[in-house]
Image (cartoon, rainbow, N blue to C red):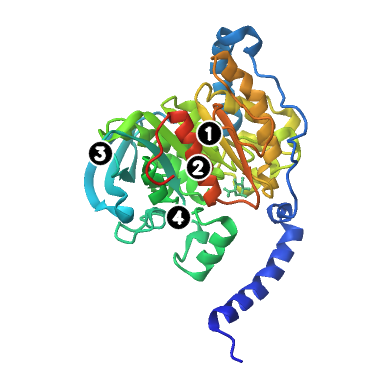
């Protein structure tokens, strides 16, 4: 009997992939970690050092907060960028009945000027829900692979700027396999579902200003009017967080958007940026940080997830250069991830995780959330309302979500994100829950 071509191709693909994964498993930590499962109780070393000022009530925390803010810049992300000035130079409707009629797709061109002749431009896609005429809450979602891939549309301008190699070629078999491993929403969110729940989406390609390549980072900083040799120069995570705020500048002025209801979602390295944007910019009411790991919500002192030596070697452009000095000296850090989370209080943050994503250290994120939670109580709101990792409670301003499987974005993740948004922004569910 003749073998069908797809079956033959699948067999060939697995024959090539399995030995490759096997080889990687012994040599490469993230792959080896897939064989492990995170602690179901979140147990591990306590978050250190204690948060300053908290023992002295809200006034004590508010006094300490600027120092905590400064410390995260000095130790992790580099100096914040100046806000600059954003202008909308173009605004057009692409499709008034996109996503099976659920939304209206518009494209905006943003032009940003900064001191020292710095400049940048962002192509911003805005998808507005058709179900309501009221100003809509919006979720900001940056893209790695560009807008055509993120919006699943070929009729918008193709990327002008570099994409990571794993993004190409879109629509290929490889992409199919990648999505079955990393989840169907790793490149593009479930737009129709989001729109039918009453949320708008703002999307852009991070490479419009800051491509995720170490070799291009100095050029990124120069174009923004910054000195790439400055010891406190921002890493790409800091630039991405700044881009989120520049998009917020424009959304605040859009009539179709409820400026009191800005949420930002990021996965993995972009979740690190989303947390930082939430810490630095109080206009973000809800932060959805999925699998943010080291340099995000997970404690460095956990000794389980990605070590500093590994992240700074693999991605030297992500953080402030001095972060690498803490490689193998995690205990010497003057802060940990609970400092970053505490800066978001009293606003809302969801931490997404998966059991087999030990590289992102789900247990470390749980304990960071526990350690930061008392700061929410100082504002008289509930922080983490959960006693178990696997029983999400969206009524607390910190929610912890964990599901089976590995790194990636799946339908059940978006179900949790939307449930949290509904609870925290008090929006009503649309026709399609
Ligand atoms: C790598 C990196 C992580 C990062 C992840 C991602 O695994 O080590 O820190 O979060 O990539 O962005 O997918």
Foreground label between 2 and 4 = 2
- State which tag comes first along the sequence, 2 or 4: 4
Point out which mark residue 88 bears.
3
Q: Say which residue label 2 marks.
A: 266
Q: Say which residue label 4 marks.
A: 145
For label 4, the SS is loop
Quadrant of image for the C terminus: top left
- Mark pair 1, 4: CA separation: 21 Å
Is residue 85 visible in the rendered image? The answer is no
Between 57 and 294, the one lying in front of the other is 57
Image x and y of residue 362, in percent:
67, 40
Image x and y of residue 352, in percent:
58, 41
Between 143 and 351, the one lying in front of the other is 351
Q: Say which residue label 1 marks.
A: 275
- Mark pair 3, 4: CA separation: 23 Å
Between 167 and 259, the one lying in front of the other is 259
For label 2, the SS is strand
For label 3, the SS is strand
Between 48 and 141, the one lying in front of the other is 141
Foreground label between 3 and 2 = 2
- State which tag comes first along the sequence, 3 or 2: 3
Residue appearing at x 68%, y 52% in the figure: 30
Asked if 169 appears above or below 348 in the picture, the reply is below
- Neighbour tally class for label 4: few under 14, some 14-19, many 20 plus, Cα within 10 Å: many
Asked if 108 appears above or below 70 in the picture, the reply is below
Asked if marks 2 and 1 touch (Cβ < 8 Å), the reply is yes
- Mark pair 2, 4: CA separation: 14 Å
Residue appearing at x 70%, y 46% in the figure: 358
Foreground label between 3 and 1 = 1
Disc 1: residue Cβ within 8 A of ligand 1's nearest atom: no
């Amino acid at each position: 009997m003749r073998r069908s071509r797809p079956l033959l191709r699948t067999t060939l693909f697995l024959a090539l992939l399995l030995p490759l994964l096997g080889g990687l498993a012994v040599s490469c930590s993230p792959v080896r970690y897939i064989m492990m499962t995170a602690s179901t109780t979140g147990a591990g070393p306590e978050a250190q050092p204690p948060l300053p000022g908290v023992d002295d009530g809200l006034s004590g925390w508010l006094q300490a907060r600027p120092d905590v803010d400064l410390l995260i810049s000095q130790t992790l992300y580099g100096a914040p960028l100046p806000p600059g000035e954003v202008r909308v130079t173009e605004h057009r409707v692409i499709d008034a009945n996109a996503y099976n009629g659920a939304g209206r797709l518009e494209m905006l061109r943003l032009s940003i000027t900064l001191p020292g002749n710095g400049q940048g431009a962002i192509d911003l896609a805005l998808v507005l829900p058709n179900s309501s005429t009221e100003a809509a809450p919006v979720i900001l979602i940056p893209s790695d692979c560009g807008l055509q891939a993120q919006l699943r549309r070929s009729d918008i301008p193709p990327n002008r700027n570099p994409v990571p190699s794993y993004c190409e070629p879109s629509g290929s078999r490889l992409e199919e396999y990648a999505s079955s491993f990393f989840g169907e929403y790793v490149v593009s969110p479930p737009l129709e579902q989001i729109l039918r729940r009453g949320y708008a989406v703002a999307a852009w390609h991070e490479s419009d200003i800051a491509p995720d390549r170490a070799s291009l980072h100095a050029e990124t900083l120069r174009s923004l009017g910054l000195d790439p040799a400055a010891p406190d120069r921002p890493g790409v995570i800091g630039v991405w967080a700044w881009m989120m705020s520049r998009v917020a500048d424009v959304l605040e002025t859009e009539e179709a958007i409820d400026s009191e209801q800005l949420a930002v979602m990021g996965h993995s390295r972009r979740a690190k940026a989303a947390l930082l944007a939430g810490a630095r910019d109080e206009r973000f009411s809800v932060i959805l940080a999925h699998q943010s790991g080291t340099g995000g919500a997970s404690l460095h002192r956990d000794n389980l997830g990605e070590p500093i030596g590994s992240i700074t070697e693999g991605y030297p452009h992500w953080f402030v250069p001095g972060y690498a000095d803490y490689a193998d000296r995690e205990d010497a850090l003057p802060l940990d991830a609970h400092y970053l989370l505490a800066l978001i209080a009293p606003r809302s943050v969801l931490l997404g995780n998966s059991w087999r994503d030990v590289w992102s250290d789900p247990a470390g994120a749980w304990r960071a959330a526990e350690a930061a939670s008392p700061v929410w109580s100082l504002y008289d709101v509930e922080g983490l309302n959960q006693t178990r990792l696997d029983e999400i409670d969206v009524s607390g301003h910190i929610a912890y979500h964990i599901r089976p499987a590995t790194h990636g974005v799946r339908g059940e993740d978006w179900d949790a994100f939307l449930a949290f948004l509904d609870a925290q922004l008090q929006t009503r569910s649309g026709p399609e829950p």
